[in-house]
Image (cartoon, rainbow, N blue to C red):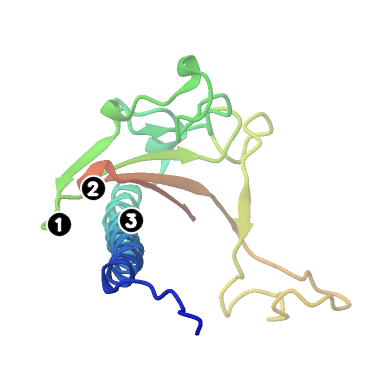
Amino acid sequence: MRHHACRSPRNQHGVILFIALIVLVAMSLAGIALMRSVDTNVLIAGNLAFRQGTTLAADRGIEDAKTWLAANAGTTLFSDQPVPYYWANWQSGVDLVGIGSAADDYNWNQANNLGADAGSNEVRYVIHRLCTTAGDPSGAGTSCVKASVAAGSGSSGSGTKGAVGYGSAALPGISNTYYRVTVRVTGPRNTVSYVQAVLN
């Protein structure tokens, strides 16, 4: 009669314990990876929220620049002003966002500082008249970027809204000069946003 050798219960229990330890380690690693993924997503969402907040805060700088331009309309805007945040030309060699050489970076300490809002966003802005040089924008040497404005009801031009017609200009009327407003907002967690608007 043949006798079959059987594994002892001790050996079987040892294999199950080894498999259980492997499963436990795998589950622990999966849990750690899930926690890190959630933390990263929360951090990204928070940074995006701060960035959106700084972008929205830039509206305050644009509105303040618009008010300043309206209050100083006329020959005052023909030349650089004592306040260092208005320039009668576009300063083509200046890097406003600080990605070029340090010598060309704009000094934001001299920009108009509106202070911090309720969300701790510090708003600063600078205005550039879109002309190559200072002076009267109607002069030949200033080379200003201008927008044509349709004339009023007393004008001989017709309201074609840009369409070409016989006997009348497509855009009759006077022309206004463009101004570029660059706003820098510094927010929490060293968030920095730049927003530009063109006004006329």
Mark 3 and mark 2 lie on one chain; the one further toward the N terminus is 3
Mark 2 vs 1: CB contact within 8 A: yes
Front residue of 45 and 36: 36
Amino acid on which the number 3 mark rests in the picture: Arg
In the drawing, what numbered circle is on residue 119?
Answer: 1
Residue at (46, 38) in percent of width and height = 128
**Residue 68 in the image, given as x and y percentages of width and height:** 29, 48
| Image position of 85 (left or right of 162) | left
**Residue 51 in the image, given as x and y percentages of width and height:** 33, 56
Q: Quadrant of residue 170?
A: bottom right
Front residue of 15 and 2: 2
| Image position of 116 (left or right of 7) | left
Front residue of 107 and 172: 107
Amino acid on which the number 2 mark rests in the picture: Gly
In the drawing, what numbered circle is on residue 51?
Answer: 3
Q: Is residue 166 above or below residue 14?
A: below
Mark 3 vs 2: CB contact within 8 A: yes
| Image position of 13 (left or right of 135) | left
**Under tag 1, what secondary structure?**
loop
Crowdedness of circle 1 by 10 Å Cα count: few (<14), some, many (20+)? Answer: few
Foreground label between 1 and 3 = 3
Circle 2 sits on which residue? 187
**Under tag 2, what secondary structure?**
loop
Mark 1 and mark 3 lie on one chain; the one further toward the N terminus is 3
